[in-house]
Image: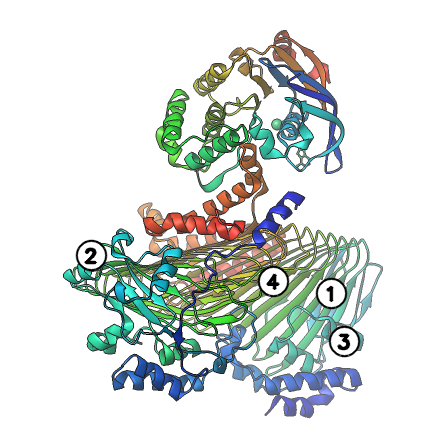
């Protein structure tokens, strides 16, 4: 590698995290640590009915007997579950504020800084946002308009109060609390998150979006999201996240469940930009996320798109269970790791129904001293006649101290199903760099352009409003300084 | 019976059991078995294996009255019949064949870094009762054909062979495994290629349904050497092909290929693993399989590129054709890359025979079954046409025809 | 002097490729270099553009009062050097339009000129493309990706006409073009030619020089220029090949 490339790398690895500020706000927390009292505290704070509390306690008793899953290519010190706060709310949030005049101006200011204005006159056009600050949902925009269509978009806490039937029916139906230790943990202590229900035949006219922010120190965030698309409906949902810079690692263990009934389609996009830690690997979010979608009905479709640039550790496999005949699952992923970040991410496509199709496009970019693993499983069960999968995973290495790994599991038990899988790993192409620079682009611009080109297949799947943002984010996670 | 009891009971029939060093090594192995039971859940490489057969076996070994034959009628061509894993000694100015010695055992068990918790290799080390060592002397170019014969039913052969290709030598090695009796062979080949040497290794496997073959190889390549391995698995009994290669010096190459043909209830487990530990090396891992009836196969491939192994080229391909509703194929093509200047890729496809192609051939007047057979042959055409030994090519063709005759 | 190459010797992987090469180009001149395959023509072009694989063992190059070796690849480009590659590389996912837009603005920035906005750039690109017979749809594609050999060459010339270089080096731009495409490409070059810019045209056929009239023709054999003169040399090569120069 020539010296110039090294220089550029050097600037990359000094990656500055623009969302690293802390909001100075009083918060209310229970004692640190996890026990039945903590769970009762959370449930009480949320004013939950008894069945919900029992559901949580059952999950907790499962969790106590479980060990963390070990398959990932990650190394980190053992998590001390007794050294974490499981709930944190800005004071005065026993009930969700009715309107913004009840919200602490400091919070509104925080979201302005993050580029998510909450004030009525400034809200993002065409995007309804539910904003979660530490453990509680603070605001939901465009609520009225959605209600007219019968769409429910609210915090999960509110849904437990107002739509207990839907919650009882679907919560935990795709990710059973006992699935693995992180799902059990989340089920026991989840605090907030979003709930979406799209009624039969309704095409949701705007993007629904949740914005997660961890602010308080030593606090875990355990959000729970549940999206149900009833027959023939459509929804596109986007999730974004940030956290302040802190020297300690913070735990984030979310569960996201999607259910698509007959002819319904859910598009779920994530731009994950949690604090990744500094250039020496200090601090950063531990992101252990379980995302799973069930294509329950015929002709249903679930599509995951993720741009993962943040977190010290990413452990995440958005998956699809393709149960309905002709259902479709998609997974588009860009994962960039820099400095000491570690990512172990991918997907699981389980083909159960006939004629089910899945597509996986994964792009991994490793820089600095990071480790980046794609881990994916495609399985065709006996009855999955004529099922199809296409998988493409490419890795790019920038610098000679990082690692890029590809671990696909391919399992076919049906002789009419077809799996096609391609993968490649290489370094950034010197000829392409030369070509771009011969046209006058700087080395850094050229790298950013080529990497963005490498990710294009994925980025173009994002909703328009966010594709440009994501492109910038990709460049930023390479460059180190904001634009 | 526990593995330990089994060992203690049969000690007198096991190689090197008087050697203190080896004994303590074996105690360690026994401990590993005790602590780390054959745990299918956490060890994917045990997927689909009928473990009971290999753990609770009745140990039985005999040295046969028939002796092995070494034939050197033509110059540079040696043909060997090994009986129950043994081979008599032989020496000329080109090759030397001897028994394996304590030091060969130790050499492998101490230096085996690539995979040290393969239970079946550990079983081999524990119950070792046969094996030989062949050295190809410097700058010679020779051919060896080995037929592995087992004389009795219910034998358990634990065999370790060492192959050493000295500097500048070139070896063409054809091994035949065609056993009809009800026995278990667990064979470990330890292969060393010195500078600028070359080994083309063919393994033809065609055992009857009640014979179980576990074959593992560990090859290591020094500067400018090339190891090529081609496995042709037509066995009707269980076969495990696990082949590991280490490229320890610059500009060396490993090429691990295999094709397998399964039918009835048969199972095969395959694994190839290439570790790139030096610059400018190349590797290739290609397995193709046809699965009929209720057969099952797994294939694990892995390219590991160390941080110093710049300018690596590594390629993997796995392909499977499922001919029946009840067949299943699992594959896991892995890349683990710690160097940046690399070109590594893998491809994998599993599916039925291309229906469009069948349609096309039928529209030209061919029956469905004839079309299927033609397409199976063309699926492995590359592997077949690359055999440059006419005699061997004929043997393989015959076996293929036999397999195809059962395809309905 | 506009471009001055003095005693240039260049090595790659321990092999001497250029051996004491001398060449001077003035403003407004068109030079052609002809030579057999492997004589080092592309090497010369790449050394001028600043490609990093080469080891300069001797000599110097001046370009517009600069020591060329003080400038890196992009600085040379921004100073007005353009290389139309013999084998343009494919860059999947990178769209032609924004790519060229950034390129032209990098140059303008260095020249302290105002950057060109999206709209004006799109207009400029469209008009230049249609001059060169390039389908507008092609501008939506990724750089060189899936282009035929001829399309790649045309697209190089499109970039050249957009970036409007002071020194354009065309490395075998004629190869792979049919006669109609050759005409379009050479028309493009001729339109661009002024008294203030210069061309270095590398080819090993004489054909191209029927369309672009060079002021000087140089014969390059085995890493150095063995003969220089006017277009009569091209005719000589056409007749007898390179044999007699070797
Ligand atoms: N990257 C390289 N590594 C080794 N040799 C090279 C490289 N590039 C070019 N060469 C050698 O340099 C010589 C000149 O090549 P080139 O400049 O491409 O010639 P031309 O363009 O005149 O055909 C040839 O012998 C070629 O093989
Ligand atoms: Mg050339």
Within 10 Å of the Cα at label 2, are there few (<14), some (14-19), or many (20+) other Cα atoms? Answer: some
Label 4 sits on residue: A280
Q: Which chain carries label 3?
A: B
Measured in 3D between alpha carbons, the distance from the residue under mark 1 to the one under mark 4, in whole angstroms, is: 48 Å
**Which mark is on residue A203?**
2
Within 10 Å of the Cα at label 4, are there few (<14), some (14-19), or many (20+) other Cα atoms? Answer: few
Q: Which x, y percent locates residue A120?
A: 25, 56
Residue B185 in view: no
Q: Which residue lies furthest to the right in this view?
A: B93
| Quarter of the rendered structure image containing ligand 1 | top right
Q: Element at badge 1?
A: strand
Q: Choose mark 2 or mark 4, whichever is in front.
A: 4
Label 3 sits on residue: B106
Measured in 3D between alpha carbons, the distance from the residue under mark 2 to the one under mark 3, in whole angstroms, is: 70 Å
Label 1 sits on residue: B163
User: Between residues A413 and A319, which one lies in front from this camera angle?
Assistant: A319
Mark 1 in CB contact with mark 4 (< 8 angstroms)? no
Q: In the figure, A381 relative to C60: above or below? A: below
Mark 2 in CB contact with mark 1 (< 8 angstroms)? no
Q: Is residue B40 left or right of residue A301?
A: right
Measured in 3D between alpha carbons, the distance from the residue under mark 4 to the one under mark 3, in whole angstroms, is: 43 Å
Q: Earlier in the sequence, mark 2 or mark 4?
A: 2
| Quarter-of-image position of residue B71 | bottom right
Q: Element at badge 3?
A: helix
Q: Choose mark 2 or mark 3, whichever is in front.
A: 2
Q: Choose mark 1 or mark 3, whichever is in front.
A: 3
Q: Choose mark 1 or mark 4, whichever is in front.
A: 4
């Amino acid at each position: 590698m020539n010296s110039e490339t090294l220089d550029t790398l050097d600037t990359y690895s000094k990656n500055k995290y623009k969302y690293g500020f802390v909001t100075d706000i009083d918060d209310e927390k229970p004692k640190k640590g996890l026990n039945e009292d903590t769970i009762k505290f959370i449930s009480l704070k949320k004013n939950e009915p008894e069945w919900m509390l029992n559901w949580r306690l059952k999950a907790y008793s499962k969790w106590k007997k479980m060990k963390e899953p070990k398959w990932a290519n990650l190394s980190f010190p053992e998590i001390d579950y007794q050294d974490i706060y499981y709930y944190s709310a800005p004071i005065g949030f026993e009930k969700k504020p009715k309107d913004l005049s009840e919200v602490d101006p400091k919070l509104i200011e925080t979201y302005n800084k993050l580029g998510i204005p909450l004030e009525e006159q400034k809200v993002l056009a065409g995007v309804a946002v539910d904003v979660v600050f530490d453990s509680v949902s603070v605001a939901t925009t465009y609520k009225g308009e959605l209600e007219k269509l019968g769409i429910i978009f609210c915090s999960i806490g509110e849904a437990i109060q107002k739509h207990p039937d839907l919650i009882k029916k679907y919560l935990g139906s795709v990710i059973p609390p006992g699935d693995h230790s992180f799902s059990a943990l989340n089920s026991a202590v989840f605090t907030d998150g979003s709930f979406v229900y799209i009624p039969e035949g309704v095409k949701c006219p705007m993007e629904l979006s949740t914005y997660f922010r961890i602010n308080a120190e030593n606090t875990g965030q355990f959000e729970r999201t549940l999206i149900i698309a009833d027959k023939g409906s459509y929804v596109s949902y986007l999730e974004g996240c940030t956290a302040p810079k802190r020297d300690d690692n913070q735990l984030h263990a979310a569960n996201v469940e999607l259910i698509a009934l007959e002819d319904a389609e859910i598009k779920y996009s994530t731009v994950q930009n949690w604090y990744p830690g500094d250039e020496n690997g200090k601090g950063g979010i531990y992101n252990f996320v379980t995302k799973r979608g069930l294509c329950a009905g015929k002709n249903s479709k679930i599509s995951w798109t993720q741009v993962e640039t943040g977190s010290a550790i990413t452990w995440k496999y958005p998956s699809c269970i393709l149960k309905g005949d002709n259902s479709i699952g998609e997974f588009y992923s860009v994962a960039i790791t820099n400095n000491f970040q570690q990512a172990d991410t991918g997907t699981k496509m389980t083909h159960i129904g006939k004629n089910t199709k899945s597509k996986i496009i994964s792009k991994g970019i490793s820089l600095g001293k990071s480790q980046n693993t794609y881990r994916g499983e495609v399985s065709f069960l006996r009855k999955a006649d004529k099922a199809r999968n296409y998988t493409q995973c490419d890795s790019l290495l920038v610098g000679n101290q990082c690692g890029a790994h590809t671990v696909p599991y391919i399992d076919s038990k049906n002789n009419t199903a077809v799996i096609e899988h391609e993968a490649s790993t290489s370094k950034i192409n010197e000829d392409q760099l030369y070509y771009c620079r011969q046209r006058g682009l700087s080395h850094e611009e050229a790298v950013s352009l080529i990497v963005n080109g490498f990710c294009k297949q994925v980025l173009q799947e994002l909703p328009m409003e966010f594709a440009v943002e994501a492109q910038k984010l990709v460049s930023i996670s390479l460059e180190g300084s904001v634009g | 019976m526990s593995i330990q009891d089994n060992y203690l009971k049969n000690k007198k029939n096991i190689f090197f059991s008087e050697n203190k060093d080896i004994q303590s090594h074996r105690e360690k192995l026994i401990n590993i078995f005790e602590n780390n039971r054959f745990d299918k859940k956490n060890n994917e490489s045990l997927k689909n294996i009928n473990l009971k057969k290999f753990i609770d076996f009745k140990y039985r070994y005999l040295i046969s009255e028939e002796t092995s034959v070494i034939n050197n009628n033509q110059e540079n061509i040696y043909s060997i019949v090994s009986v129950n894993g043994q081979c008599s000694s032989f020496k000329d100015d080109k090759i030397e064949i001897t028994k394996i010695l304590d030091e060969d055992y130790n050499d492998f068990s101490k230096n085996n870094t690539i995979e040290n918790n393969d239970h079946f290799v550990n079983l081999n080390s524990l119950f070792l009762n046969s094996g030989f060592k062949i050295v190809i002397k410097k700058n010679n170019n020779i051919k060896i054909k080995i037929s592995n014969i087992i004389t009795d039913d219910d034998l358990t052969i634990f065999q370790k062979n060492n192959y050493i290709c000295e500097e500048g030598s070139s070896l063409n090695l054809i091994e035949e495994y065609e056993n009809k009796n009800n026995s278990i062979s667990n064979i470990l080949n330890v292969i060393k290629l010195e500078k600028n040497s070359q080994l083309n290794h063919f393994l033809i496997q065609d055992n009857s349904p009640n014979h179980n073959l576990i074959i593992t190889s560990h090859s290591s390549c020094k500067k400018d050497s090339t190891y090529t391995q081609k496995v042709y698995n037509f066995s009707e009994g269980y076969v495990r092909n696990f082949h590991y290669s280490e490229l320890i010096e610059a500009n060396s190459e490993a090429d691990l290929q295999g094709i397998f043909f399964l039918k009835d209830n048969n199972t095969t487990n395959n694994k190839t693993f290439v570790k790139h530990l030096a610059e400018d090396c190349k590797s290739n891992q290609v397995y193709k399989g046809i699965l009929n009836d209720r057969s099952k196969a797994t294939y694990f491939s892995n390219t590991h590129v160390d941080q110093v192994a710049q300018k690596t080229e590594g390629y993997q391909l796995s392909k499977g054709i499922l001919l029946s509703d009840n067949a299943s194929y699992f594959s896991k093509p892995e890349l683990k890359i710690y160097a940046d200047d690399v070109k590594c890729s893998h491809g994998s496809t599993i599916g039925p025979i291309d229906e469009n192609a069948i349609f096309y051939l039928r529209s030209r007047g061919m029956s469905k079954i004839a079309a299927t057979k033609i397409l199976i042959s063309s699926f492995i055409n590359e592997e077949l046409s690359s055999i440059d030994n006419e005699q061997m090519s004929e043997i393989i063709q015959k076996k293929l025809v036999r397999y195809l005759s059962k395809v309905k | 002097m506009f471009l001055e190459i003095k005693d240039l010797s260049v090595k790659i992987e321990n092999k001497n490729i250029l051996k004491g090469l001398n060449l001077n180009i003035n403003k407004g001149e068109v030079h052609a270099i002809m030579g057999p395959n492997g004589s080092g023509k592309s090497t010369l072009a790449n050394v001028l553009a600043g490609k990093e694989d080469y080891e300069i063992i001797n000599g110097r190059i001046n370009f517009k009062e600069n020591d060329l070796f003080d400038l890196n690849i992009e600085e040379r480009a921004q100073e007005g050097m353009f290389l139309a590659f013999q084998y343009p590389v494919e860059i999947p996912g990178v769209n032609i339009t924004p790519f060229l837009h950034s390129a032209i603005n990098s140059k303008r920035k260095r020249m302290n000129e105002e950057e060109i906005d999206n709209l004006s750039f799109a207009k400029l690109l469209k008009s230049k493309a249609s001059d060169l017979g390039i389908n507008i749809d092609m501008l939506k594609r990724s750089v060189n990706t899936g282009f035929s050999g001829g399309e790649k060459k045309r697209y190089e010339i499109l970039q050249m006409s957009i970036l409007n270089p002071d020194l354009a080096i065309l490395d075998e731009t004629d190869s792979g073009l049919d006669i109609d495409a050759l005409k379009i490409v050479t028309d493009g070059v001729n339109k661009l030619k002024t008294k203030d810019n210069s061309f270095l045209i590398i080819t090993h056929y004489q054909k191209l020089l029927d369309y672009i009239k060079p002021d000087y023709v140089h014969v390059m054999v085995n890493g150095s220029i063995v003969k220089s003169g006017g277009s009569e040399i091209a005719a000589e090569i056409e007749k007898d090949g390179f044999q007699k120069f070797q």
